[in-house]
Structures are given as C-alpha cells and as structure tokens.
Image (spheres, rainbow, N blue to C red):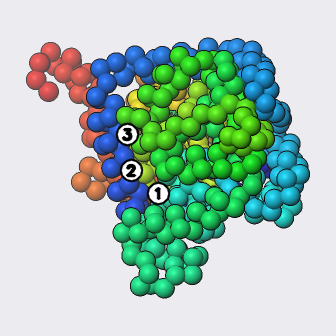
Amino acid sequence: MSGGAPKARSFSKAAHEALQDTQLRRNLARATSTIREKRLRATEELPDWQGLREAGRAIKAHTLAHLDHYLMRLEQNVVARGGRVHWARDAAEANAIVQELVLATGAREVIKVKSITTDEIGLNDALSAVGVHAIETDLAELIVQLAHEPSSHILVPAIHKNRAEIRALFLDAMGLAPSELSDEPAALAAAARRFLRGKFLEARVGISGANFAVAETGAVCVVESEGNGRMCTTLPETLITVMGIEKVVPDWRAMEVFLQLLPRSSTAERMNPYTSFWSGVRPGDGPQAFHLVLLDNGRSDVLAQPERRQTLHCIRCSACLNVCPVYARVGGHAYGSHYPGPIGAILSPQLFDTPEADTLPFASTLCGACYDVCPVKIDIPSVLLDLRLRSVERRRVRRGRLAALETEDGAMRLAAAVFAEPRRYEWAQRWARVVQTPFVRDGYVERLPGYLAGWTRTRDVPAVPARTFREWWRARERSGSSEP
Ligand code: SF4
C-alpha cells in the first residue's frame, strides 16, 4: 500500500463517525460556503469563463493523448538547463530516489511545500526512516503536521480546524504561554512565520510539488498564497521537485489558460499572490542542484482507461470539494486518502487498489455539482458510475456465482425484472399494499423492518396509495367519464 492509500476502513464507517462531530460540521459548513460564494463571484466576472473551461479541457486531453512526447520534451529541456530528471514507477522508487538525493547532501532536515504528491507516496515517513526530518512550510500543512493529522482538504489542509483549535495547537507545539498568542489570524500567522523563518534560512534541501511543468522550456511552476513556496524553492542549495507525470503542459500558451482557471477556481482570486517558475540551475542564483522526480504511481494505468483518463485532467483546484454535499458534511478524513472529496472519490480508487478505496465511488449523491464547477470539465459523475460498476463486478468475481443471490445485487435484479413488465409491476403494487399495512401512518411508511430499515432511517417513504394511477385510469375508461 502506498503512502496515501485509504486507511483500512470503508468510507461509510468513517463517514458515520465524522457525522457525530458537530464542531467539525460547523467548521466545514462555514469554510466551504464562504469559499463557494467567493468562487462564484470570481468566475462570473469573466465573460468567457465557459470558453476558458473548454480550452483547459482540450489542452489537458491533447497533452494526455501525447503524454510520452511532452514528457520527453520536458526532460530534454530540464537537462539542457542544468537540472536532472528521475523517473519513478511507483511510490517506493520515488521515495528511494529522494532519500538518496537528500542523504548525499548530508542534510538531516528538509523544508517542504506544495506537497500533496509527496503525501501520496508517504515521503515524510520514508525520510524519517533514514533519519531526515521534513518540515512542512505551507501554513495549513504545518498545522496538520503539528497536530499529527493527515490533511483534510486539497487546498486548505486544516479546513476542519477553527482558530481556537489552531491557537491551542501552536501554544503546545511552539512552547508559548497563553498570554503570548491570541486566536486572531494575524497573530497565528506571525507565530508560524517566526517558527518557520529560521528553518528557511538553515535548510540546505527544499522539496516541492509542482502545479505545472512547461515542456517547451523545462520550466516548473508552483502557485501559492503565502510566499513560503518561493522561499522553499529559492533558498536551499538543493531543490527536489516531485511531480505527477500528468502535470506537464505543452507550452506557455497553455499556462495562459491555466493561470486564469486555477486561482479563480481555488482561492477565488484573479491571480495567485505568488506564481513561481524555475528551470534548471544558474550559478550564484537560487539552488545549485535541481532534481525533478517524475512520478507515475498508477497514472499510466488510469491513462489506459478511455472513460476514466479524464481524471488526470485535474489541476487540484479543490472547487469540487467545496460544492460537494457529502464532503461538506463528513470532511476529508472520512475519505482516508490525501485526495478527498469528489476528485478523491475517483482518483484514489484508481491509484490505490485496495478494498477501502473501492468504497469511495459510492461517497457521492451524483448531484453533478462537481462537474458544473470543475474548471477542466471533468465529468466526475460518469467516472464515479464507471468505478461503481468496476467495484460491483470485482465483488461479483470475488464471491462467484453466489453474488447473484446477495441482497443488493439480488434486489437490483428483482427491481429490474419488476419495472420491465407492466403486469409484474402492478402485481408488486398490489402485494406491497397488503404487506405495508402494519407500517403505514398518515400515508407514509416511517419504519421498515430488517434489511429494508436503511431506506427509512433518515426519511419516510410514501405508502402505495389505496388506488394507483393505473387503477384510476382504467376505472375512468370503463365508466367513460372524464371525472375521477
Ligand atoms: S476535479 Fe476539477 S474541480 Fe475537482 S480539484 Fe480537480 S480540477 Fe478542481
């Protein structure tokens, strides 16, 4: 199992626990509704927003169709500018490459930024195993690192925490007295800045992720809001960037599109406060050694699936998380993966082939809000359905012919048979009218017994009426009346 693989429990179990936490639900509701409204205003400002989305989708589809070409071009240009490129088939290979590079510098501490891909491969644990301590420098990442928790949002990893919780965490981790720190955002940010400043100045190795890499010139890009990413990518002597192979874009014209789509969709800004590009190394200016680790880790397999390859279009803006009614109630930890929310529900089962990840495509109401907001038009509901089908088929293969007799599968087959034949359907209605009698109150079934109890646990089911529409219609036809 790779570093970011879903923890060993199903989504429904984890979600059930998360729903008991009312403080978590309050924190999530406040944060996601604020980001949602801001994003809407930021996108409505642009008259050609839909055109930009289509351009983003088309560029991603083209790049993925020629991925080998653009990756080779990227490698040539990074090397031509003094960088080194390393290819990693999976998490173990990527971790081994980074371990070796860090140990060769003699550093025992590294600073990190924009590192969801390194979370995916469990890099911090791998470094710790060889005696190297990794310090997250993105404020929200630092908060979850100090709390010894995984992140719960792609963009705002500490979205599940409020100001008071963060203050308590800082007091403890930074050894401050209560009088030295308020829960004002500015005070919390200043405390984090003091904590990190020394780390930036001392670090000899920086490790980053990447939002994009431009094949045309070998330039790698990180966008962020705090400036910590720029410190990380410019101050250390050695810079190691771990990047998923799908992040490559063909040229600067493509960046023109994505640098409009990403900030408006993620932080609802017209442009990111810090957009850093670097290519190779230059004597006397910034890191003197640059390593780009290109990570596959299952992406080639995703690419090979025509219906699902659009998953790799994702630019990690997190807009789909903020509109998802499921995410807004259970938060990111319930997904058990560093990729939560709708994108996590389609990406994690494809990257991490575990039974727990296989439950994630069911973590959706299929309302389609994620598709509507996605800046690169990923049809998440269609991919979810495709993955649900895969999950059901796998279960059927695992359990053999008996699967046909199992409750869910059997119920669906029975329903299909009943709905396919009008006489069967009417017979089922007459039967249900008799069987439902002890459970009906004021025209509704409030509680069903046994396996069916799940249907009525959170809602009432309308009872089958004393006379159905078909019965009424036939009676009307027989009497020749236009009245019921
Ligand atoms: S799937 Fe679309 S909306 Fe969700 S994070 Fe990726 S790019 Fe953003």
For the residue pair 28 and 183, the one nearer the viewer reads as 183
Counting residues from the start of the chain, the first of labels 2 and 3 encountered is 2
State if disc 2 and disc 1 touch (CB < 8 Å): yes
Which residue is label 2 attached to? 32
Q: CA distance from mark 2 to mark 3?
A: 12 Å
Q: CA distance from mark 1 to mark 2?
A: 9 Å
The residue located at (48%, 22%) in the rendering is: 257
Is 342 displayed left or right of 242 in the figure?
left
Lateral position of residue 349 relative to residue 341, left or right: right
| Mark closer to the observer (2, 3) | 3
**Residue at mark 1 to residue at mark 3: CA–CA distance:** 16 Å
Q: Residue tagged by mark 1?
A: 159
Question: Callout 2: few (<14), some (14-19), or many (20+) C-alpha neighbours within 10 Å?
Answer: some
Q: Residue at x 53, y 23 (%)?
A: 255
Number of residue marks: 3
Look at 30% across and 43% down and name the residue there: 37
Q: Nearer the viewer, residue 402 or 259?
A: 259
